[in-house]
Amino acid sequence: MTAPVNETSETNETLAGRAAALMPGGVGSSARVLHRPFVFTRAKGAELTDADGRTYVDLNCAFGAIVLGHGDEAQLARALELASGLGLVGLGTTPIEMDLADLVVRHLPSAERVVFCCSGSEATYHALRLARGRTGRPRIAKFQGAYHGWHDYVAMNFMTTPDAIGTYDPFSAGIPPGVGESTLVLPFNDTDRVEALLRREAASLAAVIVEPIMHNTGSFAGRPDFLAMLRRVTAELGIVLIFDEVISGFRHGLGGYQAICGVTPDLTTFGKAIANGFPIAGVAGRKDLMDGFRAKPHGTVMFGGTYNATPLSCAAAIACIERLSRPGAHDRLYALGTRFRDGVQAAIDALGVPAQVAGHGSISILHFMRGPMDSYEDIAVNRRDLDVAFRVAMIERGFMMSTTPFRRLHLTLAHTETQIDAAVAAAADALAGLPY
Ligand code: PLP
C-alpha cells in the first residue's frame, strides 16, 4: 500500500512522475494539464495546497463547480445528514431525489419536469437526443466558441483559431466521419444571420443549444434582441431551444441566467455549481418534451445511468441550494466578482496595455485584445501567447488557474476581499511584465 498522498513527504515533481507512469499525461482530464506538474494535497475554502507545501488562492475553482468553497463543512454535514440511511439504491426513486427535483422545478423558470445524471456532458447529450427524438429531425445547431461537453455532436468549433472559423473544427480525434455534418455552427449574437440560417435549415434542425451568457468561450452575454430572436424563431419553426446553464445555473442565481435575461428555453441543462463539486447534473424543461424520456410509459427516448441521482450527490445539491438560498449569497458572489474585475481593469488602464476584462457575477476573464467582445469572432484575436504567460505568472505569484487560454476564473463564497485585492495586485504585477 502506498501512503495516502496527503501524508507523503514527496514533492510535486516526484509524485507527478508516479502519476505520469499510471495515467496518460498524469492527469484525469485534458483541461487539468498545467505548465508544470502539480499534485494537490489539500483543498479548503478558497485555497489549494500542493505537495511542495505551497498554498495558492484558487481562482479556477474546478472550472466553476466549486461555489461555496472547497470542503465546505456545513454542506458536507448537511449532505451526510440528508443522505443518511441511503446508499445508491438503483431501483425506483428516493425522497431525496424528489426533494431535489422539487427545488429545481421551483427555482428554474423553464423546469416543469427534471431528470438527474452525473455530468454536464451527459446532460447536454440527453437533451440533444431528447430534442431529436421528439422532433424527428436529425441535426442540431451550436455556436462557434461554445463548449457543451466532450461528446461527438458538440465536440467541435470551440477554441478555433481565427483562420479556421467557418470550417468544421473537431477538437478530438476519433470522431466518426459525417458527425460534423449533423451540427450546424452559428455565429453568436449575430441576430440577422442566425435567423436566416435557422429559417433555411429548419426542416432538419431538432435543437439549438446555447449558453445564454457564453462563458465558453469569452464570457459575453447574449444581447437581448439576439436571445429574443432565438426564442421567437425556434418556437415558430418547431426547433427545441436548449439553454446550457451548466456554468451559469445556480452560480448566477437559483433561476439561472434565464431568470436574469427573462428568456425561457424549452430545455435547460445544468450541473457544476448545483452541488459545490459533487457529481450531479441534469436536464429540465417543458413537460410535453420531458415526457418523451422512456421512463414515462409512452416515452421513446432512452434515459439511463447507474449513478443517476445518487443520494449523496442529491443531498449535496440540496445542501448547496439551501446555502445559496440564504439572503445575500448571490449578492456576495457578484460583489466579489465586480471587485476583481474593476481592480484588474483599473490596473490595465493604468498600464495602458492591450487587454480588457469581461465576465459576469463571480466569473471573470481577461482578453489580450481591445475592441468589441460580443462573439467568438471578436475575441478570437486574443493574444494566446500573452494569455498563457499571464496565467503562468499568476500561478507563480500564488494564484491558481488553468494555463489554457480563454479559461474563465471563478470565485466562491469562501473568497475574501483580502484575497481578491491580493489577486488584483498580483495581476497588475504580472501584466506589467508581459512581452506585448
Ligand atoms: N456545458 C458547459 C457550458 C460547460 O462549460 C461544460 C463543462 O465545462 C459542460 C457542458 C460539460 O460538463 P462536464 O464537464 O460536467 O461534463
Image (cartoon, rainbow, N blue to C red):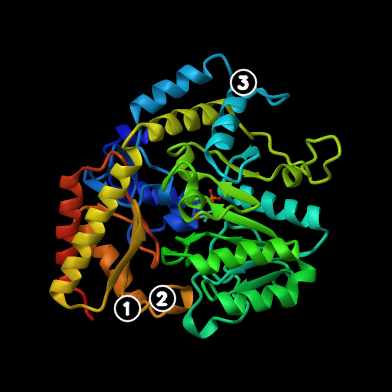
Q: Is residue 316 left or right of residue 301?
A: left
Please say whether residue 20 is visible from this viewpoint: yes
Q: Residue under label 2, please give it.
A: 379
Does the residue tagged 3 have its C-beta within 8 Å of any atom of ligand 1? no
- Circle 3 is placed at which residue position? 95
For the residues labelled 1 and 2, the Cα–Cα distance comes to 7 Å
Label 3 sits on a secondary structure element that is: helix
Dot 2 or dot 3: first in sequence order is 3
For label 1, the crowd category at 10 Å Cα-Cα, with few meaning under 14, some 14 to 19 and many 20 or more, is: many
Quadrant assignment for the N terminus: top left
Q: Is residue 432 left or right of residue 335?
A: left
Q: Quadrant of residue 385?
A: bottom left
Q: Earlier in the sequence, mark 3 or mark 1?
A: 3
Q: Residue at x 58, y 18 (%)?
A: 86
Q: Amino acid at mark 3?
A: Pro
Give above or below for 260 relative to 107.
below
> Any mark on residue 369, and which?
1
Disc 2 secondary structure class: helix
At x 29%, y 37%, the residue is 45
Task: State left or right for residue 119 relative to residue 213.
Answer: right
Determine contact: label 1, label 2, CB under 8 Å: yes
Q: Which mark is residue 317?
A: none
In this orientation, which residue lies closer to the viewer: 74 or 397? 74
- In percent of width and height, residue 433 lies at 16, 72
- Place residue 436 in its image quadrant: bottom left
Q: CA distance from mark 2 to mark 3?
A: 46 Å
Category of crowding for the residue at label 3, using alpha-carbon neighbours closer than 10 angstroms: few (below 14), some (14–19), many (at least 20): few
Say which amino acid is labelled 2. Ile
In the image, taking residue 260 as reference, residue 121 lies left or right, namely right
